[in-house]
Image (spheres, grey):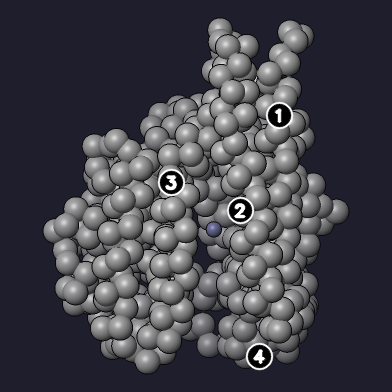
Amino acid sequence: VAELPACERLRARVADVVDLRGAGFLLTWDQATHMPPGGAPARARQIALLRQLAHERFVDPEVGRLLAAAEAEVAGLPADDVEAALVRVTRRDYERETAIPASFTRRFFHHMAASYQTWTEARPADDVQRVVPLLEETLDLSRTLAGYLGPADHVADPLIARADHGFTVAALRPLFARLREALVPLARRVAACEPPDDAFLRRGYPLGAQFAFALARAAEFGYDLRRGRLDPTHHPFAIEFSIDDVRITTRGREDDLREALFCTFHESGHGMYHQGLDGRFEATLLADGASAGVHESQSRMWENRVGRSHAFWSYAFPKLRSEFPEQLADVELDDFHRAVNVVRPGTIRTRADELTYDLHVIVRFELELELLEGRLAVRDLPDAWQARYADVVGLEASSHRDGVLQDVHWFSREIGGAFQGYTIGNVLAAQFWDAAVREYPTIPDDIGRGDFAPLHGWTQRRIHRLGRVHDPLDLIARVTGGPIDPAPYLAYLHDKYGALYRLETGDGADPPP
Ligand code: ZN
């Protein structure tokens, strides 16, 4: 093994940055799970301080000098060599973080704090006019931010690249257009059918038992409880302090059995990704998912492809029924499977079913681009939102509260780069699933027997273990044999919902791709 002294010193330096970030994440996790409300002001200060310290350590010119020396050391190593990847990823993050002037960052966070505060008041009051001037400034700042990170072909490209490196508007526009073209008519046809009965999901299920059941299944999937734990919170998330301490959160409703189950399955997918990283990446910038979209593919796979499948419930439903014998005594497996896959187009993204979820993302992605390009003025956004929902989802919200004010994203961070990852994740989940089943054709049967190790093991070997060693587009090509492609996802949705809703093929709907 060659001696790489600059790489070693860079590693040590970056380890401090990663650990400061991890300490900040721990404060964030506590804030969202156990902190009494009185702790809020001091906690906000402490989190901001740790973020600032991590930033200062990272943008230090010494890191730039070590990077240059390390680059000389790894020159000639193949791109997928761990040491070379470590240097490349560190350089990319370093350039991004040093490109933004400190004065801009201060102004940006100051504005976002004010914007978030106003949003928390304007949303319940349905007062969309109050946020318009703030959103105008956010749009302005977002363009400026993109300029610092640029140059690029499209103003949104640098913002998208921060979350989904390698993806551009030029590549995503046709992907989203294809999904829109196929999903809008499919969702309309399904919505026109009589929905299956799902009233039994609202019969009153004690929350503690729901959480215990969901966590037991997540542990069977492969989420390691020796290196993880589950806590209830308002907005579920997964968060990591190291490769061996990766926590997930969930929420539930006594009057809807779906919430706790599918939130937990979703977050366990994120959690398994981080727990599955190569231990050698500890305290380095390789210890993360390849991109937001690849991360989301893992959560969606366990939530939907496994968690909403007939095979999974043929294994898990008897257990669920013995957990809730009174509530589910008169319910059969097939009825339960149909109920957890009910399609009801609505105006709220976070309550959307699997089939209509991407329609919500499409609306946001299109509007974001139009705002950033200057084709849509902020003052026209609330009405544009309603019109686009009528167009794409087939429904309009009765208020702006459930319209343009529903998501926190545009009121707490820049406009651009936040939403595409959800849909990239859905598309990739289908491609990755197909690749896994090509290699191990018994995976669906294994799931029906409650054996999740073949699928989990495959994702670990092909995706998790690698962290950020490969750039997302390279990883996708290695795993699937090609580029991102919506065809497998659309075929899956056509097959699944065609069967569930007994749709006839060839009566005017798009054929399966
Ligand atoms: Zn997620």
Q: Which image quarter holds the N terminus? A: top right
**Residues marked 4 and 1 touching at CB (< 8 Å):** no
Residue 489's place in the image compared with 284, above or below, is below
Q: Residue at x 42, y 60 (%)?
A: 108
Pair 4/1: label in front: 1
Distance, label 3 to label 2, CA atoms, is: 13 Å
Distance, label 4 to label 2, CA atoms, is: 46 Å
Q: Residues within 10 Å of mark 3 (few under 14, many from 20)?
A: few
Pair 4/3: label in front: 3
Q: Amino acid at mark 3?
A: Pro
Q: Label 3's element?
A: loop
Q: Name the one closer to the observer, 145 or 207.
A: 145
Classify residue 118 by image quadrant.
Answer: bottom left
Q: Which residue is denoted by mark 4 in the rendering?
A: 204
User: From the Cβ of disc 4, is ligand 1 less than 8 Å away?
Assistant: no
Q: Label 1's element?
A: helix
Distance, label 1 to label 3, CA atoms, is: 25 Å
In the drawing, what numbered circle is on residue 52? 2
Distance, label 1 to label 2, CA atoms, is: 20 Å
Q: Which residue is denoted by mark 3 in the rendering?
A: 101
Q: Residue at x 22, y 60 (%)?
A: 371
Q: Earlier in the sequence, mark 1 or mark 3?
A: 1
Classify residue 395 by image quadrant.
Answer: bottom left
> Can you see residue 507?
yes
Q: Earlier in the sequence, mark 4 or mark 2?
A: 2
User: From the Cβ of disc 1, is ligand 1 less than 8 Å away?
Assistant: no
Q: Amino acid at mark 1?
A: Arg
